[in-house]
Image (cartoon, helix red, strand yellow):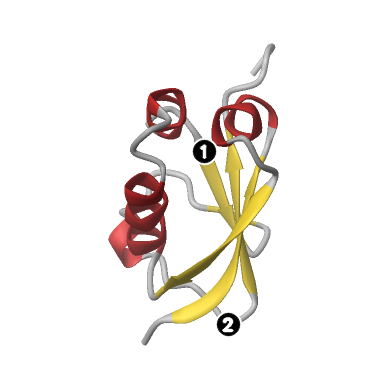
Amino acid sequence: MRVSGTVRYWAAAKSAAGRAEEPYLAATLAEALAAVRAAHTGRPELLRVLAICSFLVDGDPVGGREHAGVPLTEGGTVEVLPPFAGG
């Protein structure tokens, strides 16, 4: 079941997206990220940055989990975190 929430971009992801956040309507992290990619086909830098980002879903690190297996919650938040200097 699809739920609505917010994708928040940080650092280089925010710059590449041209915004700090946007809404999602998705059931899984994979679905939300596919929608972001589809909505931003004209922003190749964002597509490149997304490939190297880490993600938090409702404050919990996704780590190496398969994105299709990470469910989203109503009113939840997906944080898009590009690599930061020093780690």
Residue pictured at 56% horizontal, 36% vertical: 17
Residue pictured at 60% horizontal, 57% vertical: 22
Vertically, is 73 above or below 40?
A: below
Q: Quadrant of residue 47?
A: top left
Q: Amino acid at mark 2?
A: Glu
Q: Is residue 26 shown left or right of residue 81?
A: left
Query: 85 or 44: nearer the eye?
Result: 44
x, y percent for residue 76: 62, 72
What is the quadrant of the C terminus in the image? top right
Vertically, is 80 above or below 71?
A: above
Q: Which residue is mark 2?
A: 74
Q: Nearer the viewer, mark 2 or mark 1?
A: 2
Under tag 1, what secondary structure? strand
Which residue is farthest top? 86
Q: Amino acid at mark 1?
A: Ser
Residue pictured at 42% horizontal, 51% vertical: 36
CA neighbours of label 2 inside 10 A, class few (<14), some (14 to 19), many (20+)? some
What is the quadrant of the N terminus in the image? bottom left
Q: Quadrant of residue 10?
A: top right
Task: Residue 54: give its label.
Answer: 1
* Label 2 close to label 1 by CB (< 8 Å): no
x, y percent for residue 7: 59, 56
x, y percent for residue 62: 49, 52
